[in-house]
């Protein structure tokens, strides 16, 4: 009973981006917003969409803040981070802006940490919940993952132009829905087990309420948001889902905690087969397998039907695992369940055999 009493009063917390702004055409706010953090911006522009971004971003800064555009090399690697740090230092920049997809954004976050400068994140896709987080995934220059780095604070501002989001293929938005789908189930597992969040403490209640709102939002508006994205229209459903994918899921996972869905994602990534699939697509399979671990058949059926409706995978073959041999499933299960892995944040013990059995229902 003493232990229970201690748990009941455990120190809890949540973390958030400093500010969040979203809307069609909100790129027009970029310069004025950046000017509230500094007088000269070093802007890292995603290599893949540099030509699309450079003019509107420069235009948005015109007359508001001095701006230096820098083309990202493609990887979020130590050498790319160092290059941005040097370019920013040389130019005398006092605020960093990252514009584009995950790797460019993470490079900007890590460089801002090294420079001790404020960072503004301007995502051009809503494919994951990374933009709002105080986390960067560092890759080697050859493209393999090196390590995750935890940053001392979240981005100062995340500014999302939903009109730009609709210019990207809807598959990215669907993948973001897959990542957002995991948030409630993982946070709920952590709430029940008392597991720690990204601040190494249990989440406060708002983290769990945000995670619930995230799930309810994508369930209610996911399919319509994809239709709007197909039509290159930032309609009301797309607005709600972009907010869920980027902000609600971001706060929900960092502050609510992560568990089986992402652990199984990490396991799946051990297989070469899945490498052409997006993070959120693999996470969706992790969510379905996680519901099987819990024996929640009705919820499994509900989520599987939802995944099918929002173009997310429902079978291992859908993420490239056409031949789901016992050997492959054992590799996935071993990585998912290794000691200290986040799957052990679940409220019940999870074994490799349980993971294999869950994955076999998705063949
Ligand atoms: Zn994720």
Image: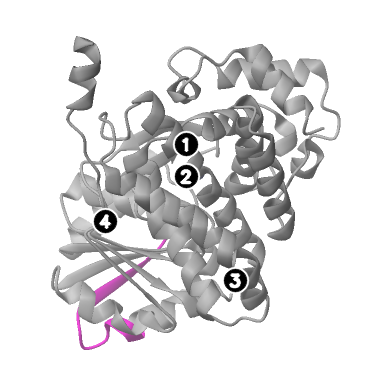
Residue indicated by mark 3:
225
Q: Are marks 3 and 4 in contact (CB under 8 Å)?
A: no
Q: Residues within 10 Å of mark 2 (few under 14, many from 20)?
A: many
Which quadrant would residue 67 be assigned to in this image? bottom left
The label nearer to you, 1 versus 4, is 1
Q: Position of residue 16 (x, y in %)?
A: 26, 52
Q: Secondary structure at mark 3?
A: helix
Q: Are marks 1 and 4 in contact (CB under 8 Å)?
A: no
Inter-mark Cα distance, 1 to 3: 24 Å
Residue 254 as seen in the image, left or right of residue 342: left
The reply to whether residue 198 is in sight is yes
Residue 135 as seen in the image, left or right of residue 246: left
Q: Are marks 1 and 2 in contact (CB under 8 Å)?
A: yes
Inter-mark Cα distance, 1 to 4: 21 Å
Q: Earlier in the sequence, mark 2 or mark 3?
A: 2
Kindly identify which numbered label has been placed on residue 17. Answer: 4
The front one of 41 and 182 is: 182
The front one of 186 and 265 is: 186
User: Looking at the image, is 353 positioned above or below residue 20?
Assistant: above
Inter-mark Cα distance, 2 to 3: 19 Å
Label 1 within 8 A of ligand 1 by Cβ: no
Residue indicated by mark 2:
183
């Amino acid at each position: 009973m003493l232990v229970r009493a201690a748990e009941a009063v455990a120190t809890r917390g949540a973390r958030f981006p400093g500010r969040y702004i979203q809307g069609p055409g909100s790129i027009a706010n970029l310069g004025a917003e950046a000017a509230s953090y500094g007088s000269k911006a070093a802007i890292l522009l995603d290599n893949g969409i540099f030509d699309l971004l450079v003019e509107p971003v420069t235009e948005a800064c015109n007359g508001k803040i001095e701006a230096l555009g820098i083309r990202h090399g493609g990887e979020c690697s130590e050498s790319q981070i160092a290059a941005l740090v040097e370019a920013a230092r040389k130019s005398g920049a006092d605020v960093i802006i990252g514009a584009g997809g995950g790797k460019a954004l993470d490079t900007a976050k890590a460089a801002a940490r090294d420079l001790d400068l404020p960072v503004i994140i301007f995502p051009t896709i809503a494919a994951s919940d990374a933009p709002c987080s105080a986390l960067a995934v560092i890759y080697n220059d050859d493209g393999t993952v090196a390590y995750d780095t935890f940053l001392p604070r979240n981005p100062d501002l995340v500014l999302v132009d939903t009109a730009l989001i609709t210019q990207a293929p809807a598959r990215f938005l669907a993948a973001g829905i897959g990542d957002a789908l995991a948030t409630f189930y993982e946070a709920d597992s952590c709430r029940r087990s008392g597991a720690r969040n990204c601040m190494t403490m249990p989440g406060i209640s708002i983290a769990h309420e945000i995670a619930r709102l995230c799930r309810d939002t994508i369930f209610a508006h996911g399919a319509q948001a994809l239709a709007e994205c197909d039509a290159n229209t930032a309609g009301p459903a797309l607005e709600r889902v972009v907010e869920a994918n980027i902000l609600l899921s971001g706060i929900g996972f960092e502050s609510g905690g992560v568990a089986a869905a992402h652990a199984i994602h990490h396991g799946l990534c051990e297989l070469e087969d899945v490498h052409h699939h997006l993070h959120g697509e693999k996470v969706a399979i992790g969510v379905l397998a996680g519901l099987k671990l819990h024996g929640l058949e009705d919820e499994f059926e509900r989520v599987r039907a939802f995944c099918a409706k929002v173009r997310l995978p429902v079978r291992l073959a859908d993420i490239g695992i056409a031949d789901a041999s016992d050997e492959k499933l054992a590799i996935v299960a071993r990585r998912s369940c290794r000691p200290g892995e986040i799957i052990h944040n679940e409220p019940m013990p999870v074994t490799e055999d349980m993971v294999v059995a869950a994955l076999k229902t998705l063949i």
